[in-house]
Image (cartoon, rainbow, N blue to C red):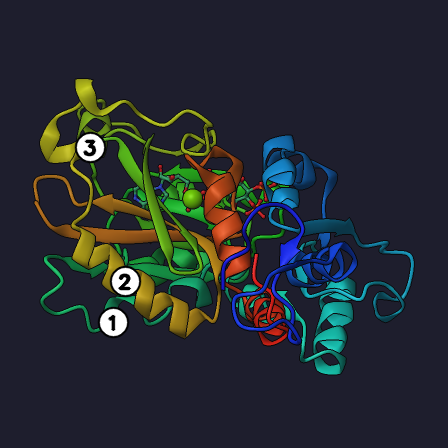
Amino acid sequence: MRVEGDNMVPRGNATDGEVVRDTASFEQAQEQQKRLVIGYALTSKKKKSFLQPKLEVLARKKGISFVSIDQDKPLSEQGPFDVVLHKLLGNEWHNVIEDYQQKHPEVTVLDPPGAIQRIYNRQSMLQGIADLNLADCDGMICVPKQMVVLKDTSSSANEVEEAGLKFPLVAKPLLVDGTAKSHQLSLAYDRLSLADLEPPLVLQEFVNHGGVLFKVFVVGDVIRVVRRFSLPNVSNCEEDKVAGVFQFPRVSSAAASVDKTDLDPRVAELPPKPLLEGLVRELRSRLGLRLFNIDMIREHGSKDVFYVIDINYFPGYGKMPDYEQVFIDFFMSLPQAKHNKRQCVKSGIEM
Ligand SMILES: Nc1ncnc2c1ncn2[C@@H]1O[C@H](COP(=O)(O)OP(=O)(O)OP(=O)(O)O)[C@@H](O)[C@H]1O
Ligand SMILES: O=P(O)(O)O[C@H]1[C@H](O)[C@H](O)[C@H](OP(=O)(O)O)[C@@H](OP(=O)(O)O)[C@@H]1O
Ligand SMILES: [Mg+2]
Ligand SMILES: [Mg+2]
């Protein structure tokens, strides 16, 4: 049923086709249908990067409002919320949101804390990905060989050899906790250098990939891929016969994507769409997450062999092209928004 002009709404008791001006019920229904309240618990850095003015303005036009959650007050005494969007660290918040989720099954929690916890551990993060059934998806998804070192790295040299890992190895803190420290990565070139590393960590084989990384952003069912600069192939470093361990900067989380015009197309060509769709479909169901990104690299010299090296919960979406509209569509696709819309149609009013 269409609304024609402002405040012209069809009413249950109107005869067929009769349309009467009824401002009060129209505005009430408009308020009812359009309101989607999203409570958010984010760090100030994340609020600044995610809740940008353009997103808030576009959201408001769709009747979506963002309400900041007061972390010093009981969550159940706040709201009511249709959706809770959160990215805070620490077990205390984990318990708060888990308890809230139990008490409020009608609220969409983005995302369930248990699912987030799994990718905050770099071992469980990648578990099972190499076994995904992605046949006929125009490519292959692998995970670099890796092993966990929980303590005493001096004995890890033998374990590395027994595990068949080849140097250089990327040393990554085992747990991701949002601190800069959990992003302090190093490249270890030889056995002796392992003793200089600080456990607990993951040692992951370095995979040559031509210096370009694909960041695959996922928002519900939407996939957006951007290219980022990455580490150069080790073969360049091997010629220098380097040994030891070298910490390297966060090369790939730059805001600017890579302009592919000056890159070797064999390196810069995006992963095949069927492969990305298959991988995201599998990961969404296995991880139980809706907001994440996947760091993928193409094995240097191959056309369609890709490695997943990292998965991030609620990443820097503000750097994703067109993120505002993607999120508006996503929020409007949530059950609460659909329910509100159904309510309005039931009362014979649709905007
Ligand atoms: N196995 C690997 N082979 C080749 N390069 C790698 C490998 N692991 C990491 N890198 C390089 O190091 C960068 C950072 O690695 P990773 O993404 O695992 O760290 P991170 O701290 O989780 O980063 P962020 O969360 O900011 O994406 C990658 O973007 C890539 O450039
Ligand atoms: O370039 P991206 O969007 O991947 O950078 C992300 C990064 O991948 C991690 O998701 C960071 O979160 P933590 O792992 O929790 O540190 C994001 O930081 P955040 O402060 O925005 O959550 C980066 O944006
Ligand atoms: Mg990464
Ligand atoms: Mg990461």
Q: Is mark 2 within 8 Å of ligand 3?
A: no
Q: Residue at x 27, y 55 (%)?
A: 144
Q: Residue at x 66, y 76 (%)?
A: 13
Residue farthest to the top?
Answer: 262
Q: Which residue is mark 3?
A: 210
**Given this view, does label 2 or label 3 mark the residue nearer the observer?**
2
Label tally: 3
**Residue 156: % across, % down:** 41, 58
Q: Earlier in the sequence, mark 2 or mark 3?
A: 3
Q: Earlier in the sequence, mark 3 or mark 1?
A: 1
**Residue 201: % across, % down:** 50, 54
Q: Confirm or deny contact between disc 2 and disc 1 (CB under 8 A).
A: yes
Q: Residue at x 38, y 63 (%)?
A: 126
Tell me the SS state at disc 2.
Answer: helix
Q: Residue type at mark 1: give it.
A: Leu
Q: Which residue is mark 1?
A: 132
**Given this view, does label 3 or label 1 mark the residue nearer the observer?**
1
Q: Which residue is mark 2?
A: 279
**Residue 335: % across, % down:** 55, 71
* In this rendering, position of residue 155 left or right of residue 20: left
Q: CA distance from mark 3 to mark 1?
A: 25 Å
Residue 180 seen in the current view? no
* In this rendering, position of residue 285 left or right of residue 299: right
Q: Is residue 48 above or below residue 310?
A: above
Quadrant in which the C terminus appears? bottom right
* In this rendering, position of residue 305 left or right of residue 278: left
Tell me the SS state at disc 3.
Answer: loop
